[in-house]
Amino acid sequence: MNILAICSALNNSYLAIKYEDKIISKIIKSDENYHSLYLISKIKEICSENSIELKKLDAITVNCGPGSFTGIRVAMSVAKVMAGELNLPLIGLNTAEILLNAFNKNVLLMDARRDMFFFGTKEKIELIYKDKIEEKIQNNSLLVDKNCSKIFENALCFEDIDKNLGEIMINIAIDKYNQTQNKEEFNYLKLEANYIQTPPIF
């Protein structure tokens, strides 16, 4: 399966293309968190340098969040436009399933501000309040972002370690595609961003 992976929900952006049994990947870094703005130019660069024809892709996969609001919007927009133009299935992944697979952990905890946190397993992500953390994470191997690492000093911080998340996404997406009988689930029009925002205050 020839597949393109796109992620700009985190502190870096990740691109990877599996094309004719070869995987080409790139990590895009930016001190000002503008990395998501380079997605299109980097996709073109990878394709040009490796003689890749986008029309020969079989699918696209994208990280739908949670994470950077702007980063998610950029990645989703690029992925949806490409999937629509090329008539390809679009396989949505969430941040937890990507990171937990990459770091071989059970639970992801990310700061959502206002004393709230994103609590994620490989199956789902939910928003929880600070006072519910302990009961949620007990006896679990914990992966955290930098803000949460200040609270849970013994937990592994994913932002301190460079992982090739593009390649991880490709493997997860191919498995998900092969295990799903109803391929209509991968229609790009059905894919929604996983922003998970805090409830409004009245």
Image (cartoon, rainbow, N blue to C red):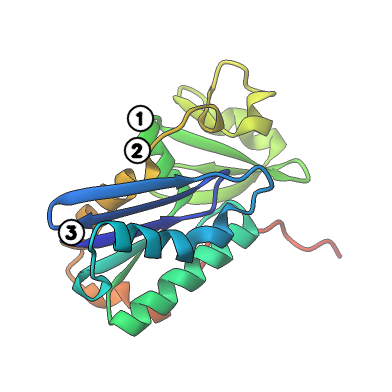
Residue 68 seen from this side: yes
Label 1 near label 2: C-beta < 8 Å?
A: yes
The numbered disc on residue 185 is none
| Residue 191 appears in view | no
Q: Circle 1 sits on which residue?
A: 104
Q: Quadrant of the N terminus?
A: bottom left
Quadrant location of the C terminus? Answer: bottom right
Element marked by disc 2: helix
Farthest residue toward the top? Answer: 154
Snapshot quadrant of residue 150? top right
Please identify the residue farthest to the left as the structure is shown.
Answer: 21
Residue at far right of view: 202
Which dot marks residue 179?
3
Does residue 114 sit above or below 152 in this rendering? below
Amino acid residing under circle 2: Asn
Whole-percent x, y for residue 34 in the image:
63, 54
Circle 2 Cα neighbour tier, 10 Å, few/some/many (<14 / 14–19 / ≥20): some
Which residue sits at x=58%, y=61%? 37
- Residue tagged by mark 2? 101
Tell me how far mark 2 sits from mark 3, CA to CA. 17 Å
Amino acid type for the residue under numbered disc 1: Asn
Observer-nearest of 111 and 88: 88
Q: Earlier in the sequence, mark 3 or mark 1?
A: 1
Residue 153 image position (x, y, % from top left): 62, 17
Spot the residue most to the front: 49
